[in-house]
Image (cartoon, rainbow, N blue to C red):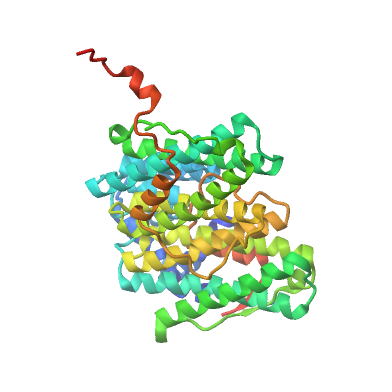
């Protein structure tokens, strides 16, 4: 087989795109080498953080994109908290805990990535009360399947509604991981992992309904209450 | 085994770059500077991260602005993958060596991949590329080889779609998202069946078409256009 570099040049379906990129950057040779070194590092890492930090630097965020990212941030707080608490309590079956440990780490990584994208527009953790779901095998599985399936559907709804192409590139890299989580947990509980050739989107309204139905989002979290001034009248 | 003609296989602007690269020393040699420019741009475009890295410097770097013409190229590129996947599962089922849940997986997923092919062909209309010829060797005749190949094909499908998402128009992105979602589910499912991590990373960073084609080439499944 030919060497990797010429392979990449030869089978370059993005040729037009790269030609455009090259033409658009009358950079010095040194600058181009630095760029390609950065890209190679990002590829070697293969890790979301790298691409999102790049996107962060690049993206001119619209109000629309900020609103979408804030919705996702809240959802990631909920999921990361749910799985992390399950892992900490350790009351679930080993296979379920194994899933929670890995998926919890992913959701925490997603949370950090979204925080990086939002910068000073990021929200504080609203605080959740999982009401025993994190130590109840059956309730946990049911909740996890519902959230993973609907999160995947939500990200499909959001993707074409994002303005920034850099944020689109980042968001889709999370989307497919959510579909993996969904298929994996479904497989774990004995449900068909993939039930249709086309997964339909679901709106933020639908997700808000699911969150509301769980009562996880407490109106007045204890942590926040402590910081509020007391009025004794 | 004949070497597939991936150049005509790709069939879009890559051809221009390719012929120029092949003729470096002949009639129209590229200047050293041009080669450096192209090499650096190609290297920088390997991953979505790389593309975004370029974007830091200019909004035009991700790709040409999305257009229906660009959608067509990307859909035709995706169609290669879908043809390949559909043919792979169909042949594996014809060979009849799969058992249990692996067989069930192949039956379900074969149906999905056929539906993806039909969707893309319909969307492309007369512009749809023809189905290439494939040779899957032992990968469809042995359950272990089947699982290994299926994991590669499904993971490749995911990063191929992800790598093009930001290059699509909004309606095309909406459609592609419905497909890649199912590819992600297939990837997780078959990885679990193969004893591999269903979700090995926190993000499925997209790959360029060039990188995807390099992976496909490494399978030696592609025989011709």
Image location of residue B81, percent across then percent down:
55, 70
> Is A49 rendered above or below residue B47?
above
Q: In what quadrant of the picture does the C terminus of chain A appear?
A: top left
Task: Say which residue appears at 57% left-offset and 67% top-offset.
Answer: A195
Q: Tell which residue pokes out farthest to the left in this image.
A: A233
Task: Say which residue appears at 61% left-offset and 30% top-offset.
Answer: A89
Q: In front here: B182 or A210?
A: A210
Q: In front here: B132 or B191?
A: B191
Task: Say which residue appears at 60% left-offset and 40% top-offset.
Answer: A100
User: Can residue B211 be seen by looking at this rendering?
Assistant: no
Report the side of B163 relative to A135 (left or right): left
Task: Please identify the quarter of the rendering in which residue A116 is found.
Answer: top left
> Is A214 rendered above or below residue B173?
above
Q: In front here: A221 or B119?
A: A221
Report the side of A57 relative to B182 (left or right): left
Task: Please identify the quarter of the rendering in which residue A15 is found.
Answer: bottom left
Image location of residue A209, percent across then percent down:
38, 51
User: Can residue A76 be seen by looking at this rendering?
Assistant: yes
Q: In what quadrant of the picture does the N terminus of chain A appear?
A: bottom right
Image location of residue B29, percent across then percent down:
42, 64
Report the side of A150 relative to A6 (left or right): left
Report the side of B73 relative to A45 (left or right): left
Q: Tell which residue pokes out farthest to the bottom in this image.
A: B126
Image location of residue A193, percent across then percent down:
60, 60
Q: How many marks?
A: 0
Q: Tell which residue pokes out farthest to the top in this image.
A: A232
Task: Please identify the quarter of the rendering in which residue B184 is found.
Answer: bottom right
Task: Say which residue appears at 35% left-offset and 24% top-offset.
Answer: A224
């Amino acid at each position: 087989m030919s060497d990797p570099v010429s392979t990449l040049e030869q089978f370059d379906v993005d040729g037009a795109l790269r030609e455009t990129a090259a033409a658009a950057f009358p950079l010095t040779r040194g600058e181009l080498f630095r760029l390609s070194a950065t890209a190679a590092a990002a590829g070697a890492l293969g890790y979301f953080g790298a691409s999102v930090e790049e996107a962060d630097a690049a993206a001119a965020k619209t109000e629309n994109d900020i609103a979408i990212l804030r919705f996702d941030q809240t959802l990631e707080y909920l999921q990361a908290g749910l799985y992390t608490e399950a892992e900490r309590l350790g009351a679930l079956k080993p296979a379920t805990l194994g899933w929670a440990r890995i998926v919890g780490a992913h959701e925490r990584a997603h949370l950090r990535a979204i925080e990086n994208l939002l910068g000073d527009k990021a929200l504080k953790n609203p605080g959740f009360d999982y009401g025993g779901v994190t130590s109840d095998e059956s309730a946990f599985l049911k909740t996890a399947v519902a959230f993973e399936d609907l999160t995947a559907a939500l990200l499909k709804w959001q993707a074409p509604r994002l303005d920034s192409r850099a944020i689109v590139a980042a968001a889709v890299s999370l989307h497919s991981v959510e579909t993996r989580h969904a298929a994996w947990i479904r497989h774990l509980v004995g449900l068909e992992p993939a039930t249709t050739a086309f997964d339909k989107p679901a709106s933020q309204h639908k997700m808000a309904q699911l969150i509301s139905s769980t009562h996880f989002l407490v109106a007045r979290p204890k942590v926040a209450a402590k910081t509020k001034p007391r009025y004794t009248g | 085994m004949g070497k597939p003609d991936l150049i005509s296989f790709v069939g879009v602007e890559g051809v221009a770059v390719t012929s120029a690269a092949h003729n470096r020393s002949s009639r129209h040699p590229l200047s050293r500077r041009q080669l450096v420019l192209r090499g650096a741009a190609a290297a920088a475009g390997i991953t979505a991260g790389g593309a975004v890295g370029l974007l830091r410097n200019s909004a035009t770097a991700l790709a040409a602005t999305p257009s229906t013409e660009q959608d067509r190229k990307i859909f035709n590129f995706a169609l290669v993958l879908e043809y390949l996947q559909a043919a792979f599962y169909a042949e594996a089922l014809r060979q009849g060596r799969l058992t249990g849940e692996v067989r069930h997986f192949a039956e379900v997923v074969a149906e999905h991949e056929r539906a993806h092919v039909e969707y893309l062909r319909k969307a492309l209309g007369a512009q749809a590329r023809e189905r290439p010829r494939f040779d899957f060797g032992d990968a469809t005749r042995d359950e272990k080889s089947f699982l290994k190949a299926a994991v590669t094909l499904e993971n490749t499908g995911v990063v191929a779609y992800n790598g093009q998402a930001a290059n699509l128009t909004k309606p095309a992105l909406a459609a592609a998202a419905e497909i890649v979602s199912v590819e992600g589910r297939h990837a997780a499912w078959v990885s679990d069946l193969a004893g591999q991590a269903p979700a090995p990373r926190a993000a499925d960073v997209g790959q360029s078409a060039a990188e995807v084609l390099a992976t496909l080439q490494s399978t030696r499944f592609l025989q011709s256009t």
